[in-house]
Amino acid sequence: MKNRKTIEAEYKNAVEQYAALGVSADKAIADLDKINISLHCWQGDDVAGFETPDAELGGGGIQVTGNHHGKAKTIEQLRKDIEKVMSLLPGKQRINLHAIYGDFKSEKIDRDQIEVKHFQSWIDWARNLGIGIDFNPTCFSHPFADDGFTLSSKNEMVRNFWVEHVKRTRRIGAEMGKQLGTPTINNIWIPDGSKDTPIDRNGHRILLKKSLDEIFSEEFPKEYLKDSVESKLFGIGSESMVVGSHEFYMGYAVKNNKLICLDSGHFHPTEQIGDKISSLLQFVEELLLHVSRGVRWDSDHVVTFNDEIQLIAQEIIRANVLERVNIGLDYFDGSINRIGAFVIGARVTQLAFLYALLEPTKMLREFEESGKYFERLAFLELLKTKPFGAVYDYYCLINNVPVGEDYIKEIQKYEVEVLIKRASANSLSTEMVESN
Ligand code: RNT
Ligand code: ZN
């Protein structure tokens, strides 16, 4: 554990080192503080939601592995876990909900029946914390998604069911944004695709376009709701074709002025979404990011401080487009402490932005414009050993959250005091159900 004096002294030293490069660490901290990361509630319970007490992620080309004890099984548990996460993060976050996380109070509410009242307790919870909500229709883990097609289904009954579901999420999202005074981003991702070579790609894409047009025919003020669409290259069981490909949604979003969601796990493994930001922003007003880490496939590993996250943050800061890029996390790892997984990814994302904010961009651009590529590369490498960690530590200190490795102890404590107890209570209640 570092004491306040040490953290301050290390920060002072960092301020001097960055000042020598013409960079203000104080300003970097002030800018970092304006960035809100949307925390994806589904890391807390392996994308299960609260439709039934034993709900599980099903189908849809996404998968979660791991069975770490004490996963949140109720809305109260999930909220408690997320509050714990937020208590370990400097700055302000948002919460990102999926439609299956409604407060259904053990009633069976199908997806085409959800209403604002099922999310009112989330809105009240968010208001109390002073945070905004983002939202998502859930077009998977449902019998009507089992054959792999939802909004692009050739079965009219199924397609209409999902159109109705997504329409409802937009109404609910708009009400969330209205009540909380910050627009809700409602992000549409569907799993539609096929395992083997399809014949009628075109037919499914015509249907997806038709469904989206129907969904977006209702208009909401931008101060309440922003719509985004998320593509994917492939998923498990949709290896040969994904209906909502990048080209499909890019075309749709540009033509209809929607946000494009870029998920870092949804492209060819060597393709970096950081590179796409300044391309897309020439044609759409805003983007949404799903910051993730794919390992060999879209595996949704916990975000780490890798080249991909650094490029994302650098591109946003260098192009000065922070106000047009909404940042959310999207990964789910059930194999380690889930609260810890949340905190690692969120802190790393902040760190990447801080790293980018501490870059002497003007100097590097001048090198570039005068052809001094050796100097550009040399400085890019030197920056990697500058004390940006000391700046992040200081940012944590002034926000009264644990500094450095101190947050690990907090999570270990929560594991003992909450998760282990929860796990034994859960297994006790399963035993009781089984013996009944
Ligand atoms: C799936 C997409 C999507 C989901 C969440 C749960 O490949 O990335 O964003 O991860 O909606
Ligand atoms: Zn995603």
Image: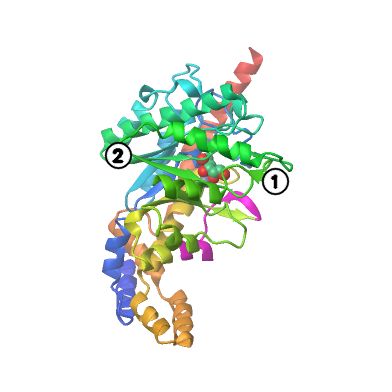
What's the residue at 56%, 43% (across, down)? 244
Q: Who is closer to the viewer here, 163 or 174?
A: 163
The crowding category of the residue bearing disc 1, from other C-alpha atoms within 10 Å (few below 14, some 14 to 19, many at least 20), is some
The quarter of the image holding the N terminus is: bottom left
In the image, is residue 209 above or below residue 316? above
Q: Is mark 2 within 8 Å of ligand 1?
A: no
Q: Secondary structure at mark 1?
A: loop
How many numbered marks, from 0 up?
A: 2
In the image, residue 285 lies at what x, y percent? Answer: 36, 53
Picture quarter containing residue 425? top right
Q: Nearer the viewer, residue 128 or 407?
A: 128
Q: Secondary structure at mark 2?
A: helix
Tell me where residue 216 appears, x and y as whole percent.
41, 35
Q: Which residue is mark 2?
A: 129
Q: Which residues are magenta?
A: 296-312
- Is residue 61 visible in the rendered structure shown here? no
